[in-house]
Amino acid sequence: MLEEIKVKKCVMFAASECNPFVGTGGLADVIGSLPAALAETGEFDVIVVLPLYSRTDEAYRKKMRFLGSINVPLSWRNQYCGVFTLAERGVRYFFLDNEYYFKRNAVYGEYDDGERFAFFSKAVLEIMPFIDCYPHILHCHDWQTALSVIYLKTLYAGRYRYKDIKAVFTVHNIEYQGKYGYDCFADLFGLPEYSRPMLDFDGCINLMKGAIEVCDRFTTVSPTYAREITDGYFAHGLEEVVRRNSGKLSGILNGIDTELYNPKTDPKLFATYSKTNTEGKEEGKRMLQEMLGLPVRGDVPVVSMISRLVAHKGLDLVNCVLEEFLQQDVQFIVLGTGDAVYRNFFFYLAERYKGKMRFIAEFNKDLAAKIYAGSDIFLMPSRQEPCGLSQMIAARYGTIPVVRRTGGLADSIVPIGEEGGFGYVFDNYNAHEMLFAVKRAAEEYKNKPLWKKYVKKAMEADFGWKKSAAGYAAMYDGLLF
């Protein structure tokens, strides 16, 4: 069924989400961009395999072609799997359908996520003969597809045409590992007994640990995070596993889709602009202030956060000093959803400082674009950040990032004072160190000629996928040749 594809080097991605079809976070952005960037090199035939969720955008569902169905064995189960396909941007996508597993309101957080993604992981391998494609590289992402790696290296290891497939596993966030009770090992996952030591960890079955142990190479989404997860502070218990397998670990910084996030063409903005003409950014700031009920002032810096409201995003630092910061001549905007303790705090301060702060408890891409473009300063003080995309998007829109030196924040933001610097970077996870950095940014905003230079440097920074794709291409080649 792929007779039109002349296989040279074939890479098959398996992931639980992908923009623009369905997405909940950074993983969807990566799977929506990296495969297309690899396909553009002309060196790879690229396939992406995804669950067909009921939430998948209807416009794309109408474009899909139904190829047929197979049965997927999962322990004692034998489950239906429909196979749909479409091609976009040089990438062939395959969507695996089973309404029992994927006709849900949510992508994640269901009581049977273990079974749902075990089915998907097994189906990724089972469709290969059906579509007549055995890739050179199977590249799996996060715990939801860890079992694809484990199945490949156990149940399928000796099978004709499977045995030569190389497995790459990417850890997007090591905090989420796919932990399940021992009762799931055979009855749910259908794994052979000899593979138990590969997955056994801390009194349970750990899918991420198993994938790291058996894959040919594993990666993280930034070089700094690759170093950090060898330390217990960052690794959430897996530091010994990571260190033991560090010889096959590499960190490759994510990029962003520079066409999607383009202030010259983004239809969601109040006004478009470029690095050589930022009048549209100034207009966008005025209209954002007006829309959110803030005083329309060009002389006051607008500081923003667009984030999930969870502790590792640095929200506890913000809680410590935000009221002190709001004593300055500033405006502060927060967009995001998450833990009630942070929502309640932001609602309280937004009510108390009505002329200085707005909090919007939503996941709203349209408003997010307007905030990225209409702000002057973007605050991202994460305790841990494997890569982070928000700081790149903000810089792309000429909004100066204030970040902590960790993970992908350290790798993507060049500190002001260094050659090509365009962001404020603080080192320690300390509320007043963060406050000093954001106060410094707010003060330097008043120096308009200097600030315009920072804005131009930020917009000139290269956050595209070309460099990242080259890093993955080199890694694939190292496995194959």
Image (cartoon, rainbow, N blue to C red):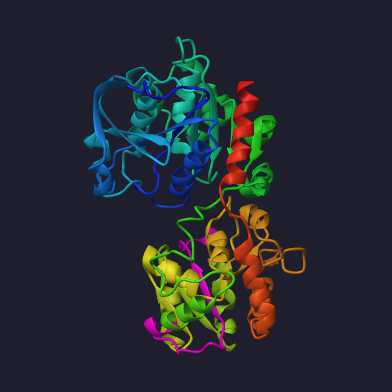
Q: Please tell me which residue is depicted at 60% across the width and 34% down the height of the picture.
A: 473
Residue 293 position in % (x across, y down): 39, 86
Residue 148 in view in this figure: yes
Does the stretch in magenta take in 296? yes
Residue 76 vs residue 245: left or right? Answer: left
Q: Please tell me which residue is depicted at 40% across the width and 64% down the height of the picture.
A: 337
Q: Is residue 429 above or below residue 88?
A: below
Residue 77 position in % (x across, y down): 27, 22
Identity of the residue furthest to the right in this view: 418
Q: Please tell me which residue is depicted at 26% across the width and 41% down the height of the picture.
A: 63
Residue 216 position in % (x across, y down): 59, 25
**In which quadrant is the C terminus drawn?**
top right
Q: Please tell me which residue is depicted at 60% across the width and 65% down the height of the picture.
A: 459
Q: How many marks?
A: 0
Q: Is residue 14 above or below residue 5?
A: below
Which is more toward the observer, 463 or 18?
463
Residue 334 vs residue 401: left or right? Answer: left
Which is more toward the observer, 49 or 425?
49
Which is more toward the observer, 225 or 10?
10
Q: Is residue 210 above or below residue 24?
A: above
Residue 238 in view in this figure: no
- The magenta stretch is 289-312
**In which quadrant is the N terminus drawn?**
top left
Does the stretch in magenta take in 385? no
